[in-house]
Amino acid sequence: MSTSVKPGPRERLLLAAQELTYRQGVGVGVDALLKEAGVARRSLYEHFGGKDGLIAEVLRRSTAEDVERYRATMDAAGEDPRARLLAVVDRLGRIAADPDFHGCRYLAADLALTDPEHPGHEVTREYRRTLRGLFADEFTALGHARPDFAADQLLILVDGLLAAGATRPAAEPATAARALAEHVIAAGLA
């Protein structure tokens, strides 16, 4: 008979917050987070200093997981930079088409966190810098004339794809995003 060890209060809070903030947004109430995690209010303050710290840590954890997914998607596409970039767009298109898709957690957090000094904003900015770097490296390997500008364009396209996937799924954002990504790639090649 196998016995599983129940995660401690910190991990339960992170798991609950990661799920609830995705489904309901970062405005989800503290009581709902505590109830879902099955922990006392003291645990929130002891481990994270409050809800802001918990939100920032959830975003940090999610960004690390998502960056690894981006890398895995690109690696699975092989060595060709064009194929690697398009694989990202295709994967995000499939994600955005899922009926349980609720949009990009990072864009949603940035829009909902009205305090410009909220620690979550630095996490989302760093995440976007990381993605931009991944994309710029691929555009450079491709021999694109303006790899940094193309990476910015692709990052905007990704934000748009994920936003449209949540707000206008019938508009086929994945198809539009793929066509735009191909244009961004081709525009900088000789």
Image (cartoon, helix red, strand yellow):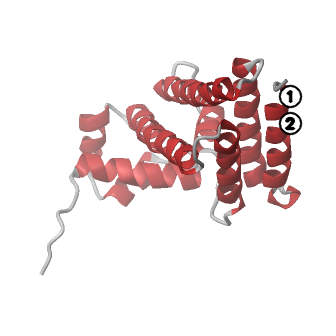
Q: Amino acid at mark 1?
A: Ala
Q: Position of residue 12 (x, y in %)?
A: 30, 53
Please tell me how crowded label 1 is: few (under 14), some (14-19), or many (20+) other residues with Cα within 10 Å.
Answer: few
Q: Position of residue 53 (x, y in %)?
A: 39, 32
Identify the residue at image location x=75%, y=23%.
144
Give left or right: position of 179 versus 42: right
Q: Amino acid at mark 2?
A: His
Give left or right: position of 152 versus 18: right
Tell which of 59 and 55 is nearer to you.
59
Please identify the quadrant where the C terminus is shown.
top right
Q: Position of residue 73 (x, y in %)?
A: 56, 48
| Residue underneath mark 1 | 187
Tell which of 163 and 66 is nearer to you.
66
Give left or right: position of 188 versus 38: right
Instruction: Give me the disc on residue 158.
Output: none
Identify the residue at image location x=31%, y=34%.
48
> From this viewpoint, which residue is outermost toward the left?
1
CA distance for labels 2 and 1: 6 Å
Q: Are marks 2 and 1 in contact (CB under 8 Å)?
A: yes
Identify the residue at image location x=79%, y=39%.
181
Give left or right: position of 87 versus 15: right
Say if 178 sits above or below 127 in the image: below
Please tell me how crowded label 2 is: few (under 14), some (14-19), or many (20+) other residues with Cα within 10 Å.
Answer: few
- Indicate the secondary structure of the residue bearing disc 1: helix
Please identify the quadrant where the N terminus is shown.
bottom left
Determine if residue 77 is in view: yes
- Indicate the secondary structure of the residue bearing disc 2: helix
Q: Quarter-wise, where is residue 42 in the image?
A: top left
Instruction: Give me the disc on residue 183.
Output: 2
